[in-house]
């Protein structure tokens, strides 16, 4: 086997220091274990950690030998020698020191780490935890809210532990913004033929198990249709009707998930390098109609592969990261947003800003500032309240705003460190949680309790966290766009090339709504996945991320339908009707505290017609393994439901990790992170939308209304959660959706009846 180039480089670097490979090897091995194979920590500062560890080990050996000699002499001299204190193990010291470095100004200013987040930190194998570990939130959200500044707004009380959203199948969904584009290689591998197999699923009445996306169902979908959406569910294997109604052994609790305030780092994204693409793998597919194509691949998938190959030589763009590749975030205290908040004890709220030395802190806010925390009046109309609130609370908000400004200054220093902290919403944010980044203002109101809004950074577009590969380039678009069009493609008598993805017809009406038949098929796909195409990876990235050595068999992914919008290479106007999602949010929305114990939710302030675009799910783009690592490292934290971008995994062979993407809106996200789950008859349906790239590894997950929605109605979508899947990394919550089709209620009632029979 060829030597690991990283190991070779490490040897080389140590050789320069006169250290032999024999000495390096054991220490490097220990270090890799200690740092959980995080090479970046080892490589940074020209292998400083490695060199330190070697020197320290040598020092320790010398010290030990010296001690032994002294002890021996002393033993000769005294009958009872003093107990010898064993020197601290070098690696432990090294790690401790490394942890200190993380919090020290000098470390941050001198050597920004590319991926230094909680994910990057060495595993706390020993009892000593890194100082930069995310603060833990107490079990009682209210209490923690009042007692720990860092926890304020970290999440609504009803948030549950990090769940992965699945596509109705479903797997958990992650957040959305994406912007930095790292280099990557094409996913499929040679010999991957027939790596994906579509299996048939028995059709079952959806009324019985609407939400279970049975992975084994066959689809009647046309070859051109690509299924969208994806929800990562804890266990897709559980997705079948029987599991939906299966009594739960464990009692449900009303305990709400805890939300901690994890640190996140967005390192520099792409470097503009060119990555080599592998040959596409061949996939066999089978749909509900039993037809198996000779190549087993939907036509659109083949076209995409060709495009990918053509794009081999294309350069990656870095789309969203800051010049330094880091995205500094202030940790600011949230304003109190309910009318009752006057009486609220805010003494434990965190100070909004961190120290100027770049380290992270969770100091309490000054008493003066705390006593002046503004209150938003109860309202039923957030849009109007925005203005009122501004007038009424400007004075009070001054203190906080000053703090925030100061925070901004201080964070100018911490910026260089590249450490990002989840940001607390401030009072002004309540008037527009999007902070002017959307076409509309999106107010936040709480007429129900004293909960603070969750802590997160609002981003209007997806952003690559670190390893995910997203390549937006003209070269990748290929010929399947309408470069000869002009004006509004929808007005043309014949559908343009962009409509090929959707069977040669435009999906949008002239009014900008999704057409009835397309919409209904997407809704059906979500509600009754058994009737649609599922594919099974030969080597499932999701399972691989859980256990790289012996991954479990793929639980199946719903093959979804895509919408393809016109874009840069198209000749049409920016106002073309085949550009809807890319224009962003245009509806009057409001984040509000739900009265039903679901925490914050999203509602519309205006009547919405059926098929209307509401918003897309925006968050960090993570690879599956990054997500799994993140979730497993934040066991007690609340996560927004992550979303798998697996709508087209079926067209691939073996997906490389950097191509198996998902979205996590926990730390960075848009208004969609507030959309609550509703079993089966949700008001929204998610549809994958291709905009910048035909590569369906990455796409936009857009929400459209499933029916006419009245003003002030809550907007919900079906996460595709399998409430019986206890193995899923993101825990399910006790569902309070109120739907008569609620899968959780069925299970609960069956559990109760099963219990009473016993
Ligand atoms: C994506 S977040 C939705 C926004 C969330 N309610 C908040 O306050 O930030 C998902 C979390 O909301 C809560 N949630 C969503 N739908 C729910 C439901 N039907 N019943 C109970 N809790 C729900 C759960 O805690 C879940 O983990």
Image: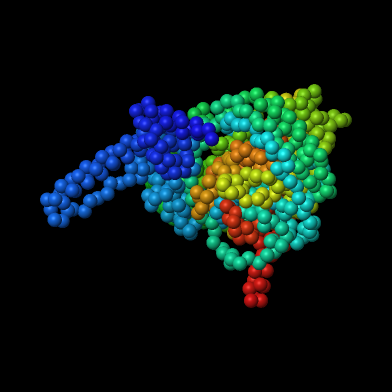
Horizontal side of 349 relative to 732 (left or right) equals left
Q: Residue furthest right?
A: 493
Which residue sits at x=28%, y=41%? Answer: 61
Position above or below: 250 against 715 = below
Q: Position of residue 2 (x, y in %)?
A: 53, 33
Horizontal side of 152 relative to 182 (left or right) equals left
**Colour scheme used in the picture?**
rainbow
Q: Specify whether residue 605 is in view.
A: no
Q: Quadrant of residue 307?
A: top right
Residue 184 vs residue 19, the one in the foreground: 19
Which image quadrant: the N terminus?
A: top right
Q: Position of residue 163 (x, y in %)?
A: 59, 51
Horizontal side of 383 relative to 292 (left or right) equals left
Residue 733 vs residue 646, the one in the foreground: 646
Q: Specify whether residue 633 is in view.
A: yes
Label tally: 0
Which residue sits at x=81%, y=41%? Answer: 293
Which image quadrant: the C terminus?
A: bottom right
Which residue sits at x=61%, y=34%? Answer: 469
Q: Quadrant of residue 16?
A: top left
Residue 301 vs residue 87, the one in the foreground: 87
Which residue sits at x=75%, y=62%? Answer: 208
Horizontal side of 335 relative to 359 (left or right) equals right
Q: Position of residue 448 (x, y in %)?
A: 57, 57
Position above or below: 632 against 501 = below
Q: Position of residue 477 (x, y in %)?
A: 71, 28
């Amino acid at each position: 086997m060829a030597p690991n180039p990283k190991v070779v480089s490490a040897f080389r670097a140590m050789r320069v220091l006169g250290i032999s490979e024999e000495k390096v090897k054991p220490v490097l091995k220990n270090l890799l274990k200690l740092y959980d194979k995080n090479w970046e920590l080892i490589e940074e500062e020209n292998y400083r950690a490695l060199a330190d560890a070697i020197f320290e080990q040598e020092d320790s050996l010398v010290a030990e030998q010296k001690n032994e000699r002294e002890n021996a002499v002393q033993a000769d001299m005294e009958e009872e020698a003093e107990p010898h204190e064993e020197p601290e193990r070098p690696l432990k010291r090294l790690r401790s020191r490394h942890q200190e470095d993380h919090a020290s100004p000098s470390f941050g200013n001198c050597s920004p780490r590319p991926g230094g987040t909680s994910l990057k930190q060495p595993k706390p194998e020993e009892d000593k935890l890194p100082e930069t570990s995310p603060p833990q939130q107490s079990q009682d959200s209210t209490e923690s809210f009042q007692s720990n500044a860092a926890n304020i707004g970290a999440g609504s009380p009803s948030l549950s532990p990090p769940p992965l959203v699945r596509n109705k199948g479903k797997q958990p969904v992650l957040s959305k913004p994406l912007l930095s584009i790292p280099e990557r290689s094409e996913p499929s591998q040679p010999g991957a033929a027939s790596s994906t197999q579509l299996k048939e699923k028995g059709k079952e009445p959806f009324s019985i198990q609407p939400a279970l996306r049975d992975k084994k169902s066959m689809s009647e979908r046309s070859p051109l249709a690509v299924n969208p959406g994806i929800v990562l569910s804890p266990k897709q294997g559980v997705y079948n009707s029987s599991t939906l109604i299966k009594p739960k052994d464990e009692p449900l609790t009303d305990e709400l998930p805890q939300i901690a305030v994890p640190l996140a780092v967005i390192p520099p994204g792409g470097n503009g390098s060119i990555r080599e693409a592998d040959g596409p793998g061949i996939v066999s597919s089978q749909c509900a109609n039993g037809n198996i194509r000779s190549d087993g691949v939907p036509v659109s998938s083949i076209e995409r592969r060709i495009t990918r190959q053509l794009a081999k030589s294309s350069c990656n763009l870095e789309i969203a990261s800051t010049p330094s590749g880091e995205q500094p975030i202030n940790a600011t205290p949230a304003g109190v947003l309910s009318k009752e908040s006057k009486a609220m004890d805010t003494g434990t709220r965190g100070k909004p800003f961190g120290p100027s030395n770049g380290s992270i802190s969770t100091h309490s806010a000054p008493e003066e500032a705390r006593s002046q925390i503004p209150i938003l009046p109860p309202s039923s109309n957030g849009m109007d309240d925005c203005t009122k609130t501004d007038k009424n609370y400007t004075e009070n908000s001054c203190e906080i705003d000053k703090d925030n400004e100061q925070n901004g200054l201080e964070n100018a220093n911490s910026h260089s460190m590249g450490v990002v902290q989840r940001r607390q919403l401030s009072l002004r944010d309540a008037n527009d949680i999007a902070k002017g980044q959307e076409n509309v203002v999106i107010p936040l109101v709480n007429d129900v309790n004293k909960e603070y809004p969750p802590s997160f950074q609002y981003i209007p577009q997806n952003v690559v966290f670190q390893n995910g590969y997203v390549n937006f380039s003209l070269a990748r678009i290929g010929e399947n766009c309408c470069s000869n069009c002009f004006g509004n493609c929808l007005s043309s008598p014949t559908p343009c090339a962009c409509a090929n993805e959707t069977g040669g017809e435009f999906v949008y009406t002239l009014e900008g709504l999704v057409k009835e038949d397309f919409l209904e098929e997407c809704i059906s796909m979500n509600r009754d996945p058994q009737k649609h195409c599922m594919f099974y990876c030969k080597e499932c990235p999701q399972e691989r991320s859980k256990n790289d050595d012996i991954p479990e068999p793929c639980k199946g992914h719903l093959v979804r339908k895509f919408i393809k919008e016109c874009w840069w290479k198209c000749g049409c106007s920016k106002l073309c009707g085949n550009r809807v999602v890319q224009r962003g949010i245009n509806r009057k929305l409001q984040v509000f505290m739900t009265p039903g114990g679901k925490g914050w939710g999203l509602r519309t302030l205006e009547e919405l017609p059926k098929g209307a675009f509401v918003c897309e799910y925006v968050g960090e783009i993570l690879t599956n393994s990054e997500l799994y690592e993140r979730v497993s490292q934040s066991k007690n934290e609340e996560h927004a439901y992550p979303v798998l971008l697996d709508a087209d995994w079926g067209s691939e062979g073996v997906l490389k990790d950097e191509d198996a993407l998902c979205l996590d809106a926990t730390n960075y996200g848009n208004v969609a992170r507030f959309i609550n789950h509703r079993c089966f008859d949700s008001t929204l349906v998610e549809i994958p939308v291709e905009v910048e790239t035909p590569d369906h590894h990455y796409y936009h997950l857009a929400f459209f209304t499933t029916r006419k929605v009245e003003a002030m109605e809550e907007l919900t979508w079906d996460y595709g959660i399998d409430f019986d899947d206890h193995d899923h990394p993101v825990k399910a919550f006790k569902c309070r959706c109120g739907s008569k089709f609620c899968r959780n209620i069925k299970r609960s009632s069956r559990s109760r009846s099963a219990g009473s029979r016993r």
